[in-house]
Each structure stands twice: as structure tokens, then as C-alpha cells.
Image (spheres, rainbow, N blue to C red):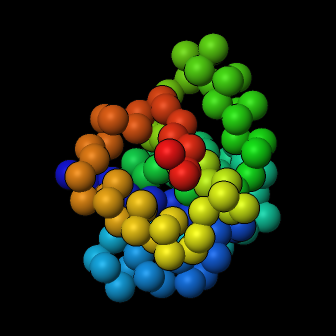
Amino acid sequence: MTIRFYADHNIQAAVVAALRAKAVDCITAEEDGKSDADDEVILERATELQRVVVTHDKDFFSIFEKWWSSGKQFAGIVHVFPTQITIAQLIDDLILIAQVCEPEEFRNAIVRLPL
């Protein structure tokens, strides 16, 4: 099984469209009716759907620490530093992750892009 993504509200539509054009499974919080949901709800929902959250939101670092220390399970987080990566590189990196990584590698983890 390949990685499936759940794009937070702050991920550009162009990124999602480019991923889909390359057959990467990605849904958005908006499509899932969660565009106004807080970040913990986003992570809970993505985990229910067995999807890795993609976000720019720094709040996910504190959520990660809270959940990690309490033993709460989640599907994973890809945190993007938008000022340090181009949209093209972000798309390429997410495609690569989707193609070569397994969901188990992201379970209960946070990955920062760029690496």
C-alpha cells in the first residue's frame, strides 16, 4: 500500500491537482467537510482514513508532541516549510514519498520538508 495524503486547508490547490495528475491519492480537508476544523480534528480524521496529513501549520508540532507522549496513535504528518521549498519541489517530494514509502514508516511520525 502506498502513502495516501490528507491536505490541510493551507496546502495550495495546485499542489493537490499536481499530485492527482500523477495518480497520488490525496484528498483535502475542504473536500472532507473539515475546512474549518481545528488541527487535532484534522489529524484524527486523517488517521481514521489512514492518510498522512500534509500541512504548513506549525501547530502540528505541539500536537505531535502531545500525542506522542500520551501514546495516541496517528497516521503521520508531513510538515512543509513553505519559505524553504518551491511548489515544484514539494510536489516532487510528495510524489516520491507516495511511491516509495509505506504507511508504517509514517505512523506516529512527523517528517519535515524540505529534508
Whole-percent x, y for residue 49 in the image: 44, 52
Q: How many marks?
A: 0
Give whichever of 44, 115 is nearer the camera.
115
Q: For residue 8, say whether it is visible.
A: no
Q: Nearer the viewer, residue 70 or 24?
A: 24
Position of 13 relative to 35 (above/below):
below
Image x and y of residue 69, in percent: 63, 14
Q: Residue 2, position in %: x, y?
A: 25, 55
List x then y, in percent, for residue 84.
Answer: 66, 58
Q: Residue at x 60, y 81 (%)?
A: 13
Q: In this orientation, which residue lies closer to the viewer: 60 or 85?
A: 85
Q: Tell me: 24 left or right of 71.
A: left
Q: Quadrant of residue 44?
A: top right
Placement of 43 over or under 7, stated as above or below: above
What residue do we see at 44% from left, 82% from top?
Answer: 18
Residue drawn where x is 31% and y is 35% of the image:
104
- Examine the image and state in which quarter residue 81 appears: bottom right
Residue 42, visible in the rendered structure: yes
Q: Is residue 97 left or right of residue 108?
A: left
Residue drawn where x is 48% and y is 30% of the image: 108
